[in-house]
Image (cartoon, rainbow, N blue to C red):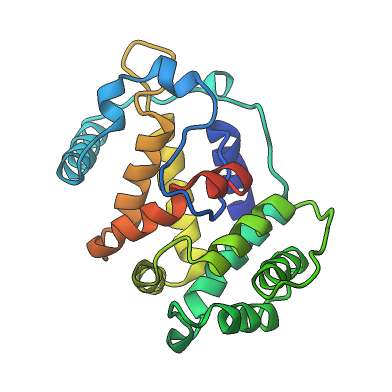
């Protein structure tokens, strides 16, 4: 990933204070309390149709020059994530995109792990995937202190435990492919999230949308060419450990 994309990722991560990791919990959990305190609660539970309407409203306000955005000093700068963590996240997307369809079945978990271990050069992901395989095969666990271990561990857990149902994984693979591949998909998602999370309430110094809603809007925008993949993407990107450890 080039420096420009890294810069975009870092800015989003600073603003969001989120982490992207796969786990078995499908509910998006906002990190921190600012979103709950600063954002109207009704904006956090938009339906699919309401998200489309909100995107149309944002586009209209943008074309009329009516949108206001948070300044640098109004953003949450509590954490900055490393390039290693970001690279691990993108590699996780790449593995999901590339895994052979014949391995994306409920009874091919170990084979799927073996394929991913053999097809990634990311040492954190290799360690995480091997750890999950060892748990499934009752082998002795391994330990690591890699810098991106949290993110990698979450990715490995999801792949091993089928945290995201197989049918949804296939939809995610399709969405990534339609978007032009892993790098373009990640770039589009991050740019969209950055954009929506910085929109502020008119005349105020707080965000208009909660982190949850900003992520939903970003996913809606990114997956617009594959609308049937939205629920699958949200199941993946909206789960606790994914959010806590990669984003």
Q: Quadrant of the C terminus?
A: top right
Viewer-side residue, 40 vs 107: 107
Query: Which image quadrant for residue 76?
Result: top right
Measuring 83% from the left and 59% from the top, which residue is drawn there?
143
Measuring 63% from the left and 52% from the top, which residue is drawn there?
6
Viewer-side residue, 195 vs 168: 168
Left or right position of 182 against 88 = left
Residue 89 in the image, given as x and y percentages of width and height: 60, 58
Q: Residue lying furthest top in this view? A: 203
Query: Which image quadrant for residue 210?
Result: top left
Left or right position of 112 against 230 = right
Query: Which image quadrant for residue 244?
Result: top right
Q: Quadrant of the N terminus?
A: bottom right
Left or right position of 76 against 51 = right
Measuring 44% from the left and 77% from the top, which residue is drawn there?
106
Q: Residue lying furthest bottom in this view? A: 102
């Amino acid at each position: 990933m080039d420096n420009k994309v890294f810069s975009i990722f870092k800015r989003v991560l600073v603003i969001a204070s989120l982490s992207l990791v796969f786990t078995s919990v499908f509910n998006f959990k906002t990190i921190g309390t600012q979103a709950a305190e600063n954002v109207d609660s009704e904006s956090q539970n938009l339906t699919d149709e309401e998200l489309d309407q909100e995107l149309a409203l944002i586009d209209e306000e943008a074309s009329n020059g009516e949108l206001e955005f948070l300044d640098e000093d109004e953003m949450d700068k509590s954490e900055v994530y490393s390039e290693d963590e970001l690279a691990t996240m993108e590699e996780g997307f790449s593995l999901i995109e590339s895994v052979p369809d014949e391995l994306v079945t409920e009874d091919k978990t170990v084979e799927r792990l073996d394929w991913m271990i053999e097809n990634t050069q990311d040492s954190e992901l290799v360690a995480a995937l091997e750890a999950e395989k060892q748990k499934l095969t009752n082998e002795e666990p391994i330990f690591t202190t890699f810098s991106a271990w949290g993110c990698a561990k979450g990715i490995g857990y999801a792949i091993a435990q089928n945290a995201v149902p197989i049918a949804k994984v296939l939809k995610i693979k399709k969405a990534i492919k339609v978007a032009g591949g892993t790098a373009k998909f990640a770039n589009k998602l991050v740019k969209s999230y950055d954009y929506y999370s910085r929109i502020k309430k008119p005349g105020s110094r707080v965000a208009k949308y909660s982190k949850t809603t900003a992520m939903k809007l970003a996913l809606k925008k990114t997956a617009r060419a594959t609308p049937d993949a939205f629920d699958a993407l949200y199941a993946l990107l909206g789960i606790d450990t994914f959010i806590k450890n990669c984003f």
